[in-house]
Amino acid sequence: MPLMISSKVICPTPCMRIHDNLEYYELKKSEVEEDKEWICLFGHLAWYTEKHCFWPSLSWEWWPLQPRKVIVQTRADVESKMKSKADNAIFYISFKTYGGLDYNAIIRRTTDGMLEHMSLEVMCLI
């Protein structure tokens, strides 16, 4: 699991043209809106992993989550807009919370090819 992605890639302003690199793909706003449910689910999992707490103990400033930037790293040979649906991928997600707090999450999704088998490794960088 990578510990982080370069700040040039995950920063909220476009600092680097990552579309030229076949391994990385930044989701467009329309793609983020389309996949917002599972992206926010990944964000919640990252938060739970970092804070080791559950819903009742969370403060109001963490909800709702607004994904700011989503970058997918995968070796899957699929068209760009399908990279977020690749079986094996690493997601670098930058979130902003209702209270204005920023945090980053790294999620590795792997599958073994069997129906309904999926593994998630999650890291939260606050």
Image: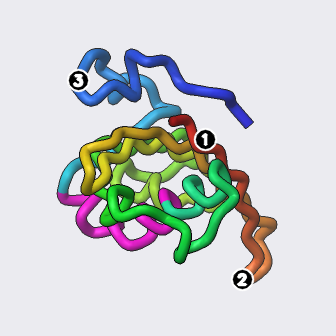
Pointer 1 and pointer 2: residues touching (CB < 8 Å)? no
Helix, strand or loop at mark 1: loop
In the image, residue 96 lies in the stretch drawn in magenta: no
Looking at the rendering, the stretch of residues picked out in magenta corresponds to 30-43
Instruction: Give the crowd class for mark 1: few <14, some 14-19, many >=20 residues within 10 Å.
Output: some
Q: What's the distance in space between the residues labelled 2 and 3, CA to CA?
A: 36 Å
Q: Is residue 112 left or right of residue 82?
A: right
Q: Is residue 104 visible?
A: yes
Cα–Cα span, label 3 and label 1: 23 Å
Q: Residue at x 22, y 24 (%)?
A: 13
- Amino acid at pointer 3: Pro
Label whose residue precedes the other's in the sequence (3 or 1): 3
Q: Amino acid at mark 2?
A: Glu
Q: Quadrant of residue 48?
A: bottom right
Residue 22 percent location from the top left of the image: 47, 31
Per the image, is 35 magenta?
A: yes
Instruction: Tell me where residue 114 appears, x and y as whole percent.
Output: 79, 78
Q: Quadrant of the N terminus?
A: top right
Q: Counting residues from the N terminus, which is met first, the one under dot 2 or under dot 3?
A: 3
In the picture, the disc for residue 14 is 3
Quadrant of the rendered structure where residue 49 is? bottom right
> Most prominent secondary structure in the magenta stretch?
helix
